[in-house]
Amino acid sequence: MSTTVVKGLDEKGHRINSMDFELLVREAAQTTNQIRLETYGQHNIGIRLSHEDGLTIDTQGPSGQRLGCMGMPGTSITCHGAASDDVGYLNIGAEITVLGDATNGVCNAMANGKVFVGGSIGARGLTMTKWNPDYDKPELWVLGSCGDSFAEFNCGGIAVVCGVEAKNPNNVLGYRPCVGMVGGIIYFRGPIDDSYSKTNAKLSQPDDEQWQWLTGQMSEFLTKIGRSELLEHLTIREEWQTLNTITPQERALMFSGPMPMAQFRNQHWNKDLGGDPLRDLSPGLDRSPIEAVPTGDLRRKVPYWANRESAAPCTYYCPVHIPTVDRLRLIREGQIDEAYEMLLNYTPLPGSVCGAICPNLCMQNCSRSGVDESIDIQLLGRSVAHVPSPVMAESSGRKVAIIGGGPAGMNTAWQLAHAGIEAHIFEKDQQIGGKLAQVIPWERLSQAIWDQEIKRFTETKNIHINLGVDLDQAQFKEIEAEFDYVVVAVGTHQPRKIPFPGHEKVIAALDFLKNAKSDQPKQIGKEVVIIGAGNVGCDVACEAYRLGAENVTLVDIQKPLAFGNEKEAAEALGAQFRWPVMTKEVTDEGLVMDTGEVIPAQTVIISIGDVPALKFLPEDVETLTVGGAAWIKTDAGHLTSNSKVLAVGDVEKPGLATHALGAGKTAADYIIAQFKGQDWKPFTKEVITQQALTITHYVPDDHADIHTEEAQAKSCLSCAACRDCHLCETICPTGAISRRELEYSHQSGYESGLGGGYEYVSDDKKCIACGFCADTCPCGIWMIRPL
Amino acid sequence: MVSARSIPVAPGSLSYTDLPWIVQHREDRCTLCGQCTAVCPKEAIYLAYRRQRMPKLDVLKKSRGNEYRTFVGIRQKTSMANACIGCSMCSMVCPNEAIMPVPNTNEHRTLFFNNQKGEPNKRGGRRNVTGPTLLDQIMFDRISMLTDPALDAGRHEFNVTTTLGRILDPAEYLKRQREGGWIPPTREIFPFIIGSMSFGALSPNMWLGLLQGVAYCNEVLGIPVVIGTGEGGCPPWVLKSPYLKYIILQIASGYFGWDEIIRAIPDMKCNPAAIEIKYGQGAKPGDGGLLMWYKVSKLIARLRGVPEGVDLPSPPVHQTLYSIEESVMKMIQTLSTAFDHKVPIYPKISASTSAKSVLNNLVRNPYAGGLLIDGIDGGTGAAYNVSMDATGHPIASCVRECYLDLIAQGKQNELPIFAAGGVGKNGNVAQNGMALVMLGASGVHIGKYIMQAAAGCLGNEKNRCNVCNVGICPKGITSQNPKLYRRLNPDLVAERVAEIYMSINTEIKKIMAPLGRSQSLPIGMSDALGIADKAAADRLHIKYVC
């Protein structure tokens, strides 16, 4: 086929516009595959032109913009001079050769084909190229250099920049090439300014395969642009470098910047600061990273096994601090005799007090009541009544005088006798036991138990009892001189009275009760009024009924203070409570109220308390006047202002029998400590809190009404005393807790049954201080403390 | 039978449904590993044993009685002292996704009891107001659509730095150059400054991690970030390091750590970036700094020059300064002299209706290098809740008024205003900051955002966590207990700082490019701002768009 020439100027020498020129070229391409164009700056030359036998377009003269635009495969276009912008724009396969320079935008959005440039190119070359994997990658060959912003967003284009006769010999790739480049490769020869986008491209040398490709293609390029003589000059491998694409995956690995932080810390931070910046403020401070849940010293808290460091409620609230929890443990261990022995170490009257008349403060806070019912302490008390006295120590020769043989004096003597100290009781009455013996009705205190316990007491070694001794000051002084200590335990045996008219007709409750309990009680009226509706008043009411009264009324100026067994017993017998009642006078008709109303009575008894009778007391024992009566002032060890005289029981302040027993034990402990030359220590344990225990482990007993010592022992929650259940060991998620056997001095006796032969320990290396041990421990032993 | 539990009910008795966060625990997933109870900063949860009664209720059988089932689970405590704060550390350490706190959607009763022992609620964090802020609502609406040269954030070069320090007017500048007069110092810095959080408010690992990140931004990334010290002083070895040039030293009414700073002056290798004189703070205007005793560790006490374990309240005002004039005279001049007049000195005040008075005084003070205004949404390590929630002034209109005032005097290019308080509150840090820049700020300070983004601070405006004041920060950001702050790896904080600034740097460009702006920060370019709120638009002198 022949070459068709299309001219860019019309016959008149005017420029043909690009639209008409393109029509002419297209027509020519339909008839021939060899076209020569004499262009005059027309744009879009060769746009989407092809021929089935391949199309060759030669352009002479000035070329307009977008030469080879949308070039088709099989078409080759040669421009014999320089070309304007966007050579090869959206080219999908044409081979375009520009023998001179090309301006901006060469290969913009080219997807396939090749562009050969015999000179240099302007800015923004090889931008937005594409690569469809079904076709070859687009190629741009430049003999000279590139302008700025080269290969931006390059997606598949291969560029070869030879750096020959470069426009800028110091920087053949221009300023900031490769921004946003995601594919392709740039081969270049000559210097660059290092401004390429470091997050998109990395500098390298062509590998063997790449070099083979480059040298293989180089001669074709040089032939196209007519510079074959340069082949040897352009195939010196050391002179070539490449800019390869960084993949997003590689970029992700580059981490937060071009330098790894560890490297920055080592090479800059530590060096510039000369070491740890806090080394002067806090030498040796370890700030190295740790886990959120550490072990060892890095824990914020640690478990602590506080076995027996606090008191069970039974022990704490009992004024004698009898460790019922220990007793029940001994029963569980099968050490029944030791359990009895232990209790008798605390009180001579377990059957009479714990088992009968005591309101049992110990059990008012029993933790078991959170599960079903509290321990039956009365049962436990009664069961000791028949047990013989424990072995007493041999007398040491020390002597203590005890004035008064009531519960306070008795327990003082009992405790001293145990320790081998001779206890000499001086009792005014003809029997010991104080008000328990004199006034408590037998209905509330079984005589059989009482007699048994009194017998056990009186037969005990080191206890000497003198009955019917009514002391005066001079005798007291003699005793004080003769004995190491004197303990005043005279109680309150002087009834309070009120001087309203007719008060001489009124019987004191104390006298009434003593009389009622005597062998020949006096007659009383059918109607009885009792002034003062406390628990003693209730005892009076019961005794009055027993002695033949038919109608008993208890009056008080305030709401009656009576509670518990006493009140229930009186009410059961029919006693009436009236309040507020102000007594105006007592006549033969009965009690006259300030309102004028008369409560008929043949017998009126006043029960508003008793006060101490202290005529024997020397002046150096200070007293305190409260409510018109004198009470002996004591300290925590029951010592009075006279360092040889102690006082215990109601004579200090009115209380329960168990308070008197407690005071007696404390005073004896104080004296024993003095004799041994030891410091006396009061009971200071805190009561364990309900929250510390985990009572949910226990299931309510539907048969809690079976009252045996063994059943009670089974019910005990063992508050504050480890019961060796291994639950902590089991729940510990890190296996830190284990049980360890201990050397233990008590191989026999009741101490041997109290669990002193082992401990649970937590391994600091394993423990994470989760607190599960404390949350699980049924006894409240494990606790979590700050570290 | 079931035990008759005796439950005393007091006015302050709370059940778990009264708490702000309810701990949901799935017994079917729990492996009883103890991690959650070990990690909980409030000791709010514990292993609970529960007993269930199952009565035998078969009507046709004679057998009666009960059976019992005991089961375990993690339960929460209901005391105020142990109320869950929603930090979710339990969820973080749980291997089985068995536990998580969920916000109580009912109003919760602890709101009425967080004044135990007569002490009003104190906390860390910032104003507990959720939802989009005004800054979040501002749009950059003036886009170059073929009307200007199109800019590409990814490709073109941008100059996004700002000037800290006083800029002389050109005539005066040339005159002084000619005559050898004093030319006030300036710094070209990145417009997002890490705001003042003291060494003490922050843990050592957090404070040093941030500084390490700032150093990295400058030296590796070439982003000229600067960081404020807060009023807790600065470790001497840092003062003597080349990193001092990235640090704004703060002097506040507590004067903590200034003896060490003055002592270090002869050994300084470079000047600090600036000196910030704190007169006020957005989170608690009119109230001074507060470092509660929990956080005054031996280290902090040593640096601050105070006894260990004491409360450190700073007075609301500098004790011997009684007027703006006097403050400016005494403090700005003294501090400028201390550094040979080579360091910009600027005051920081709470946003307030009185901000313009301060500004106008500074305009006339030749030593003043700028003004930082901190708005109501600013964060703090410790403040009374009522100060944080109810006291203060939002930043946007305050900055805008001040800037317009400068314009009226023709001084808008001379005294830079910096803004702070709630920038990035909802995560839109670049957008918030650039909105303030276009309203007239030369740059913004970010504190809480940095804690959240760089160190994973769990606090939010639903009052999650916010226990910075008592030193039990579960991430170790604001604790002085090494057992807590060692959870925080300073390297990782520094890495996050770098990532954050790389990202803000790009976002600034993404905001600037459509405006057709690349060579200077668009300070006061309010024609590019729009908001779909007529009242706000009028107040801010920007466009109302809808």
Image: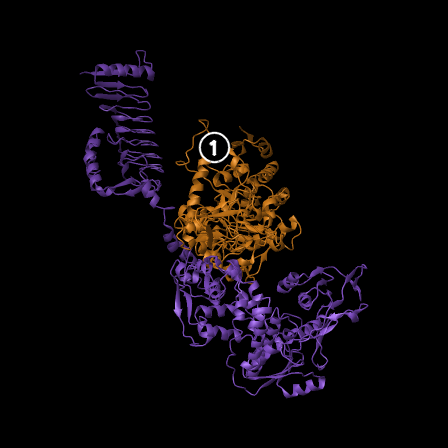
Crowd around label 1: few <14 · some 14–19 · many ≥20 (10 Å): many
In this rendering, is residue A160 above or below A669? Answer: above
What colour do you see for chain B?
A: orange
Q: Residue furthest top?
A: A11
Q: Chain of mark 1?
A: B
Which amino acid type corresponds to the residue marked 1 in the rendered image? Leu
In this rendering, is residue B133 above or below A661? Answer: above
| Secondary structure state at the residue bearing disc 1 | helix
Is B506 placed left or right of B201 in the picture?
Answer: left
The image position of residue B336, as x and y in percent, is 57, 52
What colour do you see for chain A?
A: purple
Q: Is residue B230 visible?
A: no
Q: Residue furthest left?
A: A1
**Residue at 34% in and 32% down:** A124
The residue carrying mark 1 is: B515
Q: Nearer the viewer, residue B390 or A627?
A: A627
Q: Quadrant of residue A134?
A: top left
